[in-house]
Image (cartoon, grey):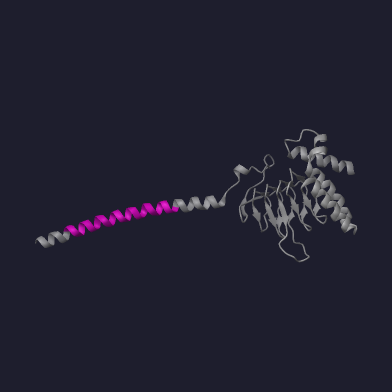
Amino acid sequence: MMFNNLRSEIQAIKEKDPAARSTLEIFLCYPGFYALLMHRISHYLWNHSLKLLARMNSNLARFLTGIEIHPGATFGKRVFIDHGMGVVVGETAEIGDDVLIYQGVILGGTTTQKTKRHPTVEKGVIIGAGAKVMGNITIGEYSKIGTGAVVLKDVPPESTCVGVPGRIVKCKRTAAKVDLEHNKLPDPVADAISILSKHLKESDENIKILFEKNEMTLDEDYDDLDNLLKK
């Protein structure tokens, strides 16, 4: 059972990372693989009331990999943390199967209360580098979180969330294309500015037309006044 799980984890890395060339390379050189392997040990210790040992093991994993995962966080199968330096996952975070997390991601809390205070990330989600997902929110299945986004509200399934704060753009998932193409992510702020710019240009043209029309009317009035004075 354990070896089957390891095999599926390694296969998932091969599918999600084109730089992965062999099983041996993944086993020896991938910090994300080791971080999750050590986390599963920490999580077991945490759930069996060996919390101090769990924290010590998680701190060792952070020292070795640069990835900080609280022992209380739960992970599904075939999760891949790519590169991983600076990734932080809080105590009550829940990560589903087949999730892809890039470097610098924070799954953080927004309250000091001892409640569910970290995100729930459902199956197949991709979280871009440097994204911050904060609080007890849910990221729906197969959603994408753009690079550097700050997500503070729920994200529906099969959506893309970008910007600061995160804005949701509906994006239907297709089986053929599930990558997070950063250069093709929508930019709602830029779209809004473009609409405003277009509106201002149209307003300027209308004002110019009205101004020219008023000038012609004034010229006609002056001509009529001159004619009256001459009489």
Q: From the viewer's side, name the closer residue of 73 and 206.
A: 73
Residue 76 in view here: no
Mostly what secondary structure, the magenta segment? Answer: helix
Question: How far across and down, in percent of the image, does residue 93 sit?
Answer: 77, 56
Question: How far across and down, in percent of the image, does residue 167 sit?
Answer: 61, 54
User: Which quarter of the rendering shows the N terminus?
Assistant: top right
Question: How far across and down, in percent of the image, does residue 81 sit?
Answer: 75, 45
Q: From the viewer's side, name the closer residue of 78 and 171.
A: 78
Report the span colored magenta. 199-223
User: In the image, what residue occupies the spot 77% across and 40% down?
Assistant: 13
Quarter location, residue 118 = bottom right
Q: From the viewer's side, name the closer residue of 168 and 157.
A: 168
Residue 53 in view here: yes
Q: Looking at the image, which residue sits at the far left?
A: 231
User: In the image, what residue occupies the spot 89% across and 44% down?
Assistant: 2
Left or right? Give the position of 80 relative to 49.
left
Q: Looking at the image, which residue sits at the far top?
A: 21
Q: Looking at the image, which residue sits at the far bottom?
A: 113
Question: How far across and down, in percent of the image, does residue 139 sit?
Answer: 70, 54
